Structure formats: structure tokens, C-alpha cells
Amino acid sequence: MLDAINLTCVRDDRVLFSELSFSVRPGEMVQIAGKNGAGKTSLLRILAGLAQAEDGEVKWQGETLSRAREHYHQDLLWLGHQPGIKTVLTAFENLSFYHTQGAESLRWQALTEVGLLGFEDVPVHQLSAGQQRRVALARLWLSAHKLWILDEPFTAIDAAGVEKLTHQLLRHTENGGMVILTTHQPLAVDNLRQIHLQEKRA
């Protein structure tokens, strides 16, 4: 359902990757791998429609992102390096803001899953970096989006949190969802497919 076709990315006169093509289908988990500076985050931002490739195109359900933008964003959950949450709100208020549908009990369950029960009424700016990351990750327990694009989702997460998050990613793909992620964390996942970026010079 997601097709990357002959993508080329150039940053500061340096070619990060070129003529990169791959597809992601329902039920797949794909890890974008490569050395630091190889263009992993740049690729994710292109796939999410947040940046433009130097050449090539991305298609969702057979349509380019420029044509499919509205329903693509309805199907997409993007979590980048920054938590992307509202720091003046509490953890519970953030989940209520981003996920207005569904029972309130589901938000409590999501906070419990990420270990934030008891911190739900604390303004996010008073939480630690790891706790702020968990507020963002709690959205994965509430998301009905088909495609998750996640940039280093395991950052600042302890071993127990990594295990829970991994199980949630697997659950999403088992239900027909798709996951594209970057991570330095080894993943014990049978259905994981890796795409390696090789650094290139302009």
C-alpha cells in the first residue's frame, strides 16, 4: 500500500541515498537501517510527507502523496525524534486531545501500558524525557491509523518498556497494520524486514 519509487535525497550537497525503491504491505514491519548520517530520518520524513525527495515519488494506495495527502494523513501516525506533544497539557489531556474518539477507559489503559499511571495529572513539561516519550508512545495503544512511521521509538525507554512496545508493534502488524521504523535497539521480531541505506557522495 506504500510504494517508494526511485527516491533520491540530497542534503547540503551530499547524496544520502539515490534510486531507492521498496514497498510496504499490510502486516509488514520494516526497519530502515544504516550508519549515522546515512539518511534514515530524512527517508522517514519523505515517507511521511514532511519533506521532499530530490527525485522519485511516494505513493499511497497507488496515488502520489500530493494527490492522496488528505486520506494519507488520516491513515498515518508519525512519531519523530521530538515527542510531538503539548507540554502545557497533562499526559491524560494530551491523549484526549489527539484521540477524541473511544472510551475514556482506553486512555487510562494506554497510560497504564506505558507506566504513566499516577502521572496522568502532571503537566508534561514537569515529566522526565523518558516519561515525555512515553506520553507520545501511549498513542500507539489508541491509534486506528493503518501506517505507523516511527523514528527511534525506543529512545529513553527501559527494557520492560521496550518489550511492551515491541509487542504492541507486533499486534499492529498482526491486525493488518504497517510499521516503518528506525532503531538502534536489536529487535527480536520474526517478521522484521530491513532496508539498509548506503552512504553516497554527490
Image (spheres, rainbow, N blue to C red):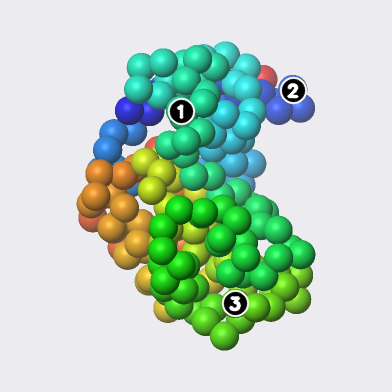
Q: Is residue 160 left or right of residue 82?
A: left
Distance (Cα) linking label 3 and label 2: 45 Å
Residue at (50, 15) in percent of width and height:
67
Name the image quarter holding the C terminus: top right
Image position, residue 41 (x, y; %): 59, 41
Amino acid type, residue under disc 2 in the picture: Asp
Foreground: 6 or 153?
153
Amino acid under label 3? Glu
Residue 120: give its label: 3
Write down the residue under mark 1: 71
Choose the circle earlier in sequence order: 3 or 2.
Answer: 2
Q: Say what secondary structure mark 2 lies in.
A: loop
Q: Give the class, few, some or many, for how many residues have Cα within 10 Å of label 2's Cα (few <14, many ≥20).
A: few
Left or right, residue 67 beside residue 144: right
Q: Secondary structure at mark 1?
A: helix
Asked if residue 180 shows in the view, the reply is no
Left or right: residue 100 compared with residue 109: right
Q: Distance between the Cα atoms at labels 1 and 3?
A: 32 Å
Examine the image and state in which quarter residue 170 appears: bottom left
Rendering coords of residue 21 (x, y %): 41, 23
Q: Residues within 10 Å of mark 3 (few under 14, many from 20)?
A: some
